[in-house]
Image (cartoon, grey):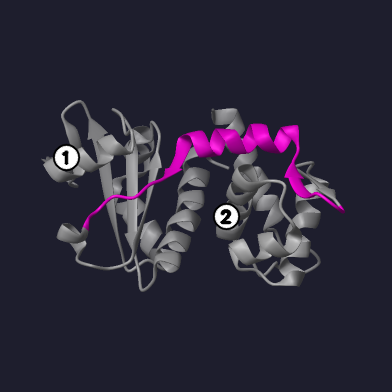
């Protein structure tokens, strides 16, 4: 998985990189959204893809061109855009290890828009970077707040800086529905809108993975 994730992170960095002094008007969030859309809904037309991820025509053209340069997609004038075998292989690794899920945490943070991602076997990431640093990275990306949850054989718990484990039975019931397992890392962010919460969470996750894999 390490090799594939490094390749994924390099792909995202390449597609979002500055060229000739100009940086694209999209971010790692839009790249992830585009690839998620493609793997589940291909073939798809350029206009429809643009609508799905919320990008203008110039930006989507730039992204598509860069995907093609890296042999991630193929474009058929009639059928639309599809992932290449390389694109499917890489992004299958992502969706099998980074899972968007719905967990009810209103009783913890109140009725605010939030987003949740499960990072399979992500416990080592939390151990290496630390809970506080991960939370701060999510907030720096625009979230109003973040919650870090880990899973062990007793259930879901909210770790503390002192090493204590605060188990939450309701969270444990919810995460079992999302097929969470021992060693999984759950990241939750909240913001003024669900889209903002999701954007902050995905962009922060890319930062977190880059630091963890030292990309």
Q: Sequence order check: which comes first, mark 2 or mark 1?
A: 2
Q: Is residue 142 above or below residue 39?
A: below
Whether residue 106 appears in this view of the structure is yes
Occupied quadrant, residue 115: bottom left
Q: Residues within 10 Å of mark 1 (few under 14, many from 20)?
A: few
Residue 68 lies left or right of residue 128; in this view the side is right
Name the residue rendered at 32%, 54% in the picture: 188
Q: Nearer the viewer, mark 2 or mark 1?
A: 2
Work out whether residue 202 or residue 40 is closer to the camera in this orientation and state it.
40
In the image, taking residue 138 as reference, residue 69 lies left or right, namely right
The correct choice, above or below, for 58 with respect to 72 in the image is below
For marks 2 and 1, give the CA distance.
Answer: 35 Å
> Is residue 91 a member of the stretch shown in magenta?
yes
Report the residue at 60% width, 51% height from top: 37
- Residue at image x 26%, y 44%? 149
Q: Quadrant of the N terminus?
A: top right
In this view, the residue farthest toward the right is 77
Q: Quadrant of the C terminus?
A: top right
The residue positioned 59% from the left and 44% from the top of the image is 40
Q: Position of residue 93 (x, y in %)?
A: 56, 33
- On residue 33, the disc is 2
Label 1: which secondary element = loop
How many marks the image carries: the answer is 2
Which of the 4 image quarters holds residue 182? top left
Q: Is residue 81 above or below residue 109?
A: above
Instruction: Report whether 150 appears left or right of 134.
Output: left
Where disc 2 sits, the SS reads: helix
User: Magenta span has 147?
Assistant: no
Q: What x and y, as percent, mark residue 210?
A: 53, 45
Residue designated by label 1: 163
Q: Residue 57 location, x and y as percent?
A: 74, 71
* Region rendered in magenta: 77-105
């Amino acid at each position: 998985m390490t090799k594939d994730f490094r390749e994924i992170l390099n792909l995202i960095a390449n597609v979002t990189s500055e060229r000739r002094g100009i940086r694209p008007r999209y971010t790692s969030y839009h790249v992830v959204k585009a690839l998620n859309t493609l793997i589940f809904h291909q073939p798809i037309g350029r206009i429809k893809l643009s609508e799905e991820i919320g990008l203008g025509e110039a930006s989507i053209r730039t992204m598509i061109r860069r995907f093609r340069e890296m042999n991630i997609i193929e474009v058929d004038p009639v059928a639309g855009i599809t992932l290449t075998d390389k694109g499917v292989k890489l992004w299958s690794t992502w969706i099998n290890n980074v899972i968007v899920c719905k967990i009810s945490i209103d009783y913890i943070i109140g009725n605010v828009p939030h987003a949740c991602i499960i990072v399979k076997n992500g416990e080592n990431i939390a151990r290496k970077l630390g809970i506080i640093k991960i939370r701060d990275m999510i907030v720096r990306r625009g979230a109003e707040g973040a919650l870090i949850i880990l899973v062990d054989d007793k259930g879901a718990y909210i770790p503390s800086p002192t090493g204590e484990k605060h188990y939450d039975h309701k969270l444990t019931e919810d995460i079992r529905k999302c097929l969470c397992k021992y060693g999984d890392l759950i990241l939750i962010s909240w913001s003024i809108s669900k889209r903002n919460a999701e954007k902050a969470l995905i962009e922060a996750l890319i930062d977190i993975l880059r630091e963890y894999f030292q990309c």
